[in-house]
Image (cartoon, rainbow, N blue to C red):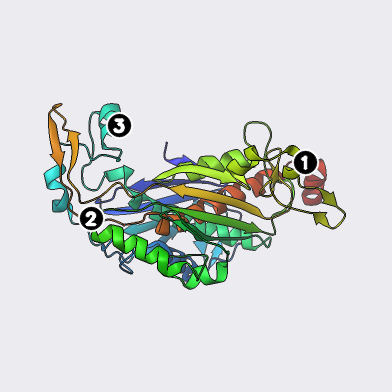
Amino acid sequence: MNSFGHKFKFSTFGESHGKALGCVVDGVPAGISIDEEFIQNEMDRRKPGQNEYATARKEGDKVEILSGVFEGITTGTTIAMVIFNENQKSKDYSNIKDLFRPGHADFTYWNKYGIRDYRGGGRSSARETAARVAAGAIAKLLLKEIGVVVQSGICEIDGIDAEQYDFKHAKSSEIFTLDAKEEQNQKDAILNAKNKHNSVGGVALINVKNTPIGLGEPIYFKLDAQIANAMMSINAVKAVEIGDGIESAKVKGYDNNDQIRLDGFKSNHSGGILGGISNGDDINVKVHFKATPSVFIKQDTIDTNDNEVTCELKGRHDPCVAIRGSVVAESMMALVLADMAILNMGAKVDHLKKIYN
């Protein structure tokens, strides 16, 4: 499926080496001010080719809004956006035309469809996520109207953990790290792997402030379930933790519970979600990205004729996909929350009375 969401819904299209990528966003309320500079800034955070810690592929990722906006304001109709590819080098993939790259979707796409676009993986490429960031920017502009703030940063690279979380620093960091003291160590780990033609993994922390109470739909459309669904749909994501995540299984119930007083919760082990519904506290989610599978070391594989062969990759790839992936995860969080916010409007009859009486 190429669509995500229920009420605030988006669909993406395009391939890594095709003419363009894009998205169609439906369910956007009329009257939202569309800041095109903000949208482009969001794209610039994710775009490739900005430093030595990302792929060398140069893409402007300029967004063109085709519909749904008039004089800078949403009209309530479908918003369509397109991003043209500018720097494809399809010949880099000619040597792997008939073989499956280890760690990639080549093998599964071939067995499912009997055909695949070998130019960078086609639809399975992380290049597709540019369209998600464009859609996520629209979601953020909607959330801004109700005071919700979504932010992200890198809390771990190659096992090097951040000891402090500074989202302000993450915005200015080349690798979006949350800890200035560990930044050089994390950078060194990336470059060390890159110089050895290898790659490293990382973990992004997504934080949401000013979340309204009540977002999430029981039983099969819980907020945490949809967040996990959204994050796991991103290339290279292998695990998602809500709040304390796996640590919750290692402590006693009393220690894990977030006790409540009139002024709020005394702790936030739950990550801002109880029973699949937001409780008004900060939402905290850790997204774990595996090491980029595109490495320039010889690997064993098979080809489309079931011959055992050697894979030797060329091309341009991120030595740590988690860095730019954190921006995508932040966008997906915004898209989930925008959808849940609109769904929540029908939770009480009082909400309808405010509109229609």
Left or right of 145, for residue 188: left
Regarding residue 165, the answer to whether it shows in the image is yes
Q: Tell me which residue sits at (47%, 56%) in the image.
A: 156
Residue 322: percent from left, percent from top: 41, 54
**189 or 305, nearer to the observer:** 189
Q: Which mark is residue 108?
A: 3
**Residue type marked 3:** Thr
- For disc 2, the neighbor class at 10 Å (few under 14, some 14 to 19, many from 20) is few
Report helix, strand or loop for mark 1.
helix
**336 or 185, nearer to the observer:** 185
Q: Residue 197 carries which label?
A: 2
Gap in angstroms between the C-alphas marked 3 and 1: 44 Å
Gap in angstroms between the C-alphas marked 2 and 1: 47 Å
Check the image and report above or below for 277 versus 49.
above
* Circle 2 or circle 1, nearest the eye: 1
Q: Which mark is residue 254?
A: 1
Q: Tell me which residue sits at (26%, 39%) in the image.
A: 102
Task: Place residue 196 in its image quadrant.
Answer: bottom left
Q: Tell me which residue sits at (57%, 40%) in the image.
A: 226
Residue 135: percent from left, percent from top: 48, 54
- For disc 1, the neighbor class at 10 Å (few under 14, some 14 to 19, many from 20) is few
**Residue type marked 1:** Tyr
Q: Do tag 2 and tag 1 residues touch (Cβ < 8 Å)? A: no
Residue 179: percent from left, percent from top: 52, 67
Q: Tell me which residue sits at (31%, 57%) in the image.
A: 319
2 or 1: tag closer to the N-terminus = 2
